[in-house]
């Protein structure tokens, strides 16, 4: 039996596009109130206007790389909706290629966003979730956090760190009523991979089993969040059928 999420409140980072926006739309349609966080104020406003409801939306234009953003998102959820139930640290950036060709400044930005952004939001949210004895933290990771992907060593390392963080904090939360897990997609055909502007290219990749959509990932996220409270899905790896790794 699926749990009803109607009336709950979610924070989603990276909510202006891709997986974050797809999750925001799915949760909004289920009656969840959404605090949407992203760096671009204009893009975030447009994304918020696209959410179907009946869940309401509050927006926070901010960079998750700033340690204050997590606390600000939690404060906004409590101010606007009076509660917090679901935390989806989703924002991330991608860097591929040889390590020696990668700008150290870009490495620092990726680590700050992909790792620090997750940790600071979860740290800010957990006291509220634990105090109420209920809640869900669901982090967007990657299959690259389960396998060592040689052509993207910086990105893969960041997702391995996220996987370790999820596994270890989940154990700290045992018995609190707060669940923690991660969704780990393979190739997702969105802006991160340069597919956002060409729906035809997306469909061709889907038809060939070489990629999945942000909506496919959001559907898996909804499955994880709606399991009965005695069930925790710690990791869910979602791959295109023709993806080898």
Image: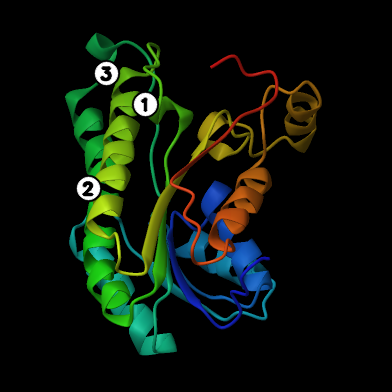
> Mark 3: which secondary structure?
loop
State the image coordinates of residue 216 (x, y, percent, origin top left): 67, 44
245 versus 55 height, above or below: above
Q: CA distance from mark 2 to mark 3?
A: 20 Å
Q: Residue at x 23, y 67 (%)?
A: 124
Instruction: Answer with the quarter of the image where residue 200 lies.
Output: top right
Report the mark closest to the observer, 1 or 2: 2
Residues marked 1 and 3 touching at CB (< 8 Å):
yes
Tag 2–tag 3 contact (CB < 8 Å): no
**In-front residue for pair 43/86:** 86
Residue at 63% across, 63% down:
25
Question: Quick one: label 2, few (<14), some, or many (20+) residues within 10 Å?
Answer: some
**Residue 240 image offset from top left, x and y in percent:** 66, 27
Residue at the spot of label 2? 116
Is residue 226 left or right of 175 when viewed as pictured? right
Q: Residues within 10 Å of mark 3 (few under 14, many from 20)?
A: few
Counting from the top left corner in percent of width and height, residue 109 is at 24, 38
Residue 65 in view of the camera: no
Q: Whole-Å distance between the Cαs marked 1 and 3?
A: 8 Å
- Sequence-wise first label, 2 or 3: 3
Q: Residues within 10 Å of mark 1 (few under 14, many from 20)?
A: some
What residue is shown with label 3? Answer: 102
Give the position of the N terminus as an image quadrant: bottom right
Task: Judge depth for marks 2 and 3 and give the one in front.
Answer: 2
Locate residue 129, reporting x and y percent. Answer: 32, 73
Q: Which residue is mark 1?
A: 95
The mark that comes first in sequence, 1 or 2, is 1
* Spatial CA span between label 1 and label 2: 16 Å
Q: Which residue is found at the position 62% from the left and 19% from the top?
A: 243
Looking at the image, residue 133 lies above or below residue 194: below
Q: Count the marks: how many?
A: 3
């Amino acid at each position: 039996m699926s749990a009803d999420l109607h009336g709950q409140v979610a924070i989603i980072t990276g909510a202006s596009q891709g997986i974050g926006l797809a999750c925001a739309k799915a949760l909004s349609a289920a009656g969840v109130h959404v605090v949407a966080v992203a760096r671009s104020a204009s893009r975030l406003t447009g994304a918020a206007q696209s959410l179907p409801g009946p869940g309401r939306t509050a927006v926070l234009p901010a960079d998750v790389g700033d340690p204050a953003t997590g606390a600000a998102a939690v404060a906004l959820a409590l101010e606007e909706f009076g509660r917090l139930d679901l935390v989806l640290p989703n924002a991330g950036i991608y860097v591929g290629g040889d390590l020696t060709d990668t700008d150290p400044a870009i490495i620092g930005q990726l680590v700050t966003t992909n790792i620090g952004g997750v940790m600071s939001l979860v740290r800010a949210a957990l006291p509220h979730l634990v105090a109420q004895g209920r809640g869900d933290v669901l982090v967007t990771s990657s299959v690259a956090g389960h396998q060592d992907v040689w052509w993207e060593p910086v990105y893969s390392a960041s997702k391995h760190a996220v996987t370790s963080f999820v596994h270890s904090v989940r154990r700290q939360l045992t018995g609190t009523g707060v669940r923690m897990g991660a969704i780990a997609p393979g190739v997702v055909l969105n802006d991160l991979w340069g597919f956002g502007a060409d729906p035809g290219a997306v469909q061709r990749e889907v038809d060939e089993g070489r990629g999945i959509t942000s909506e496919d990932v959001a559907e898996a996220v909804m499955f994880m969040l709606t399991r009965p409270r005695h069930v925790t899905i710690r990791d869910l790896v979602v791959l295109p059928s023709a993806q080898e790794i």
